[in-house]
Image (cartoon, helix red, strand yellow):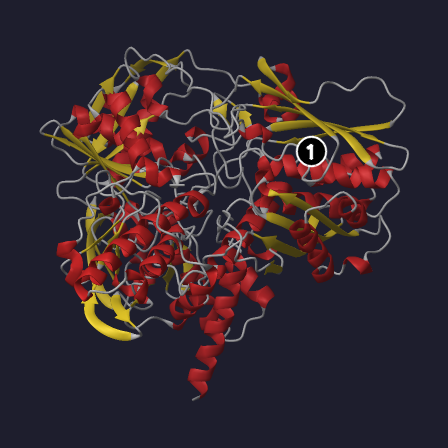
């Protein structure tokens, strides 16, 4: 049965008409027209569709919309814009941390969740936090360097 | 000599022209899929023209808009498209310089170009490309006579310009998968379980109970479910899967998952090189190496769109070439190529012939049967793993003869594989259509010297001076849809041969590095290998069998391209842990050093993953490994620090670098593992079971 479900999406109150069992990824990419979360596997195995739900990383392809009433959802579109990039996005561009880029939306979300809880992660901590995310082009080292760079910049910013 | 790609597309204005908005319109026939090719080619164009990088309008790839350069494959864009765009732009510049000289009443040699403007004696002349555009007719055939910039005059080539395609990918935009059209319909195809399978029945009422609004298309064994939303299409597809019954479904033998099983299948044989060695009293050693079927493993399952309207078909694709897609669609639909337009969009990395050609053909077949409706087909993960072509398994049986001093004097590579480009120019949907007849195999491709080209023979013999070499290739009738995967047979062959060279060196009682240098005459290759030994600390190499290993390897890509050496340091307990990887590469002129490093490193990580983790499992009706759980790849915590050094040889011809690091890194890991264990794992992937088996055997 279709019903109205209300939540906060990238800081804005949003409501959708959907079946409770509709998947968040389909709702985002369908009626909401937000394409940043990407379809990769439909089974929560690759991380390409990662979003934040109340600050925790979740696979949008495996999250039913009915469970999200009243929750805060953040997608990559909620991080920054080309004009005002999030420090993570700026660092990824600076270090050219990407090839095909299909994994990057999810990785940026995973990295944001990491830095929200740990502003100064080690390389091993970054790797562990991103281990769920698959990258096929092999930009892992650049990604880890970019996350560390963004973390350093954010610490400087916070201290200033 | 005119570059071949320019000779094939000789009209200069197809490559470069100047637009009223003050930009230079540049077009090339290469597709960007994350390898950075657009940026590197644009650097070449802008440098030859001396136009600022930000005044280029690089044309979006579509039929009719860009030159036809076929497929973007084989790491050949920089090497083959590069000279074409450079020659075209150099000729355009010369034509404009002549026009400027005529206006100024001077010799063209007195003029220079800076930021698109003509200078005389360093002073502005008031003339630039745009003010002269009306006087220079670029609708003419290129001669290829203009001279290219010498390295010391290059301003943009050799600089790490940031990638043009990257920014949108960080802000949630960019991919063909995100394209919407007014009235777009989402479709899924109920795939034949195997190519010969026939649809016995489909309970359409059951599908409609799941999704009442579904439009069910059934044509012979081609079944599509068409809906307004992707979620509905997915539901309808799931219902149809349960409601369909097939006959004539193939039963795949799981034993065919192993490289050694290739020998049990029908094959055609091709011998090349020296005659078989006669009896001799030389020392002879032999070993067999194997590599299984591999998936391209693109992170995003492929997608495609199509619309058929007023007798014209439009296709949107992220495949490797818009003109080959047009030819494929024309053959399958029966439409004339002129009635088909193909528009390219960004897709997930493909690394060869993955599923990218298929959803657009699925969509086209549906669109032809539903005129007017724009149709989008998004493959599932299971489709991409299960129905996209895979890279062939290979078995490499190697033997060598050493003279009394231990020198390698005779080398034989006997290679078993399916055709490396077998599924090119085909779509998986074809076999479901009524009256399907398999297309004839493409004509034999030839090397520039007229000899037979085979992907299985790339780097089949080691890149050293060896007196006598021969190859015997067995081309197997493939049990599964297989096609090109990054480097074709090059990387597996280098894995085998460069591991075998370590075995040969051991048999000769020599250090692997010294043994290689002893038969490597090419000075650039010696520099590469020597420098590698320095940065990886070869001199510290320790005794064999400690559980920690250091190995290296070298090859010249395809025997004529970049010279590359890699080293690996590993720790082996029950599994292999990569501790460090190194690479030194001489690829001639490097157009974009950061892009080159990115490609080289990506290749190393992918090849590390092939070496340690990956194997397509056959079974059921075809491929049994259809999820990431069944097909593990290297993850963030598996990836070691990597050091890459590029040798500066900018006066040398530029080489493609997208495929060069894989073979040497695979062999370096193989040699490091053998050094760690004191036993050799010759059959990939180097899993816990294979390591245990190698230890038991030795």
Q: Label 1: chain? A: B
| Residue B336 x, y percent position in the rendering | 20, 23
- Around disc 1, counting alpha carbons within 10 Å, would you say few (fewer than 14), some (14 to 19), or many (20 or more)? many
Which is nearer the eye, A5 or A85? A85
Q: Residue at x 47, y 43 (%)?
A: B75
Q: Is B459 drawn above or below residue B634 in the view shown?
A: above
Q: Quadrant of residue A10?
A: bottom left
User: x and y percent of residue B480 in the render?
Assistant: 49, 23
Q: Nearer the viewer, residue B277 or A17?
A: B277
Residue highlighted by disc 1: B683
Would residue B179 appear left or right of B683 to someone viewing this image? Answer: left
Q: Nearer the viewer, residue B661 or A159?
A: B661
SS of the residue under disc 1 = loop
**One can see residue B236 in this view:** no
Q: Is residue B203 left or right of residue B601?
A: left
Q: Nearer the viewer, residue B536 or B389?
A: B536
């Amino acid at each position: 049965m279709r019903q109205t479900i209300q939540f906060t999406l990238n800081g804005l109150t949003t409501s959708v008409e959907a079946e409770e069992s509709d998947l968040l990824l389909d709702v985002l990419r369908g009626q909401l027209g937000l394409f940043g979360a990407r379809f990769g596997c439909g089974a929560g195995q690759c991380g390409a569709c990662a979003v934040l739900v109340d600050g925790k990383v979740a696979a949008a392809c495996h999250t039913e919309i009915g469970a999200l009433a009243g929750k805060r959802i953040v997608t990559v579109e909620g991080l920054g814009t080309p004009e005002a990039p999030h420090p993570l996005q700026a660092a990824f561009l600076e270090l050219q941390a990407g090839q095909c880029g299909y994994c990057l939306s999810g990785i940026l979300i995973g990295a944001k969740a990491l830095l929200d809880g740990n502003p100064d992660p080690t390389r091993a901590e970054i790797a562990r936090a991103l281990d769920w995310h698959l990258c096929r082009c092999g930009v892992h080292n650049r990604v880890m360097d970019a996350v560390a760079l963004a973390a350093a910049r954010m610490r400087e910013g916070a201290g200033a | 000599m005119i570059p071949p790609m320019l000779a094939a597309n000789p009209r200069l204005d197809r490559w470069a022209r100047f637009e009223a908005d003050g930009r230079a319109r540049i077009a090339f026939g290469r597709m960007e899929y994350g390898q950075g090719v657009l940026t590197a080619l644009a650097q070449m164009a802008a440098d030859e023209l001396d136009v600022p990088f930000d005044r280029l309008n690089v044309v979006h790839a579509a039929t009719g808009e860009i030159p036809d350069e076929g497929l973007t494959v084989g790491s050949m864009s920089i090497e083959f498209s590069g000279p074409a765009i450079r020659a075209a732009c150099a000729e355009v510049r010369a034509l404009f310089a002549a026009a400027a000289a005529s206006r100024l009443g001077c010799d063209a040699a007195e003029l220079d170009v800076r930021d698109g403007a003509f200078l005389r004696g360093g002073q502005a002349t008031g003339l630039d490309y745009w003010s002269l555009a009306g006087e220079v007719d670029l609708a003419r055939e290129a001669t290829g006579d203009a001279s290219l910039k010498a390295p010391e005059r290059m301003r943009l080539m050799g600089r790490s310009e940031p990638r043009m395609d990257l920014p949108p990918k960080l802000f949630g935009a960019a991919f063909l998968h995100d394209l919407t059209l007014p009235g777009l319909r989402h479709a899924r195809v109920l795939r034949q379980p195997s190519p010969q399978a026939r649809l016995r029945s489909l309970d359409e009422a059951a599908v409609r109970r799941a999704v009442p609004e579904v439009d069910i298309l059934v044509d012979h064994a081609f079944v599509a479910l068409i809906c307004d939303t992707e979620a509905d299409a997915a539901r309808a597809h799931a219902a149809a899967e349960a409601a369909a019954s097939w006959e004539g479904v193939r039963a795949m033998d799981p034993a065919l998952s192993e490289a050694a099983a290739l020998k049990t299948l029908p094959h055609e044989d091709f011998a090349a090189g020296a005659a078989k060695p006669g009896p001799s009293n030389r020392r002879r050693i032999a070993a067999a190496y194997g590599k299984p079927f591999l998936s391209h493993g693109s992170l995003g399952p492929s997608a495609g769109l199509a619309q058929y309207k007023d007798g014209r078909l439009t296709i949107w694709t992220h495949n490797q070439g818009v003109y080959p897609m047009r030819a494929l669609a024309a053959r399958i639909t029966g439409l004339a190529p002129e009635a088909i337009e193909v528009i390219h969009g960004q897709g997930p990395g493909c690394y060869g012939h993955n599923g990218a050609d298929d959803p657009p053909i699925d969509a086209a077949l549906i669109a032809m049967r539903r005129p007017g409706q724009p149709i989008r087909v998004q493959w599932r993960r299971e489709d991409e793993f299960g129905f996209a072509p895979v890279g062939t398994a290979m078995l490499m049986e190697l033997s060598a003869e050493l003279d009394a001093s231990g020198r390698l004097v005779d080398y034989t590579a006997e290679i078993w594989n399916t055709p490396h480009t077998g599924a090119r120019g085909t779509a998986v949907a074809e076999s479901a259509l009524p009256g399907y007849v398999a297309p004839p195999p493409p004509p034999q491709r030839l090397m520039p010297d007229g000899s037979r080209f085979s992907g299985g023979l790339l780097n089949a013999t080691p890149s050293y001076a060896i007196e006598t070499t021969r190859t015997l290739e067995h081309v197997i009738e493939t049990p599964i849809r297989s096609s090109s995967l990054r480097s074709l047979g090059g990387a597996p062959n280098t894995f085998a041969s460069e591991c075998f060279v370590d075995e040969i060196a051991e048999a000769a009682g020599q250090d692997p590095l010294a043994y290689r240098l002893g038969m490597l005459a090419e000075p650039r290759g010696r520099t590469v290998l020597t420098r590698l030994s320095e940065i990886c600390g070869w001199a510290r190499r320790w005794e064999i069998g400690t559980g920690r290993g250091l190995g290296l390897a070298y090859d010249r890509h395809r025997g004529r391209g970049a010279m590359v050496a890699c080293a690996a340091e590993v720790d082996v307990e029950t599994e292999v842990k990569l501790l460090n990887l190194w690479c030194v590469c001489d690829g001639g002129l490097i157009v974009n050093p950061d892009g080159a490093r990115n490609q080289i490193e990506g290749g190393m990580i992918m090849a590390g993953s092939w070496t340690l983790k990956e194997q397509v499992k056959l079974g059921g009706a075809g491929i049994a490994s259809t999820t990431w759980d069944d097909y593990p790849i290297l993850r963030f915590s598996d990836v070691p620090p990597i050091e890459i050094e590029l040798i500066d040889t900018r006066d040398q011809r530029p080489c493609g670098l997208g495929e060069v690091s894989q073979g040497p890194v695979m062999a370096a890991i193989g040699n490091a593992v053998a050094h760690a264990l004191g036993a050799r794992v010759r059959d990939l992937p180097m899993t816990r079971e294979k390591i245990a088996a190698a230890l038991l055997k030795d």
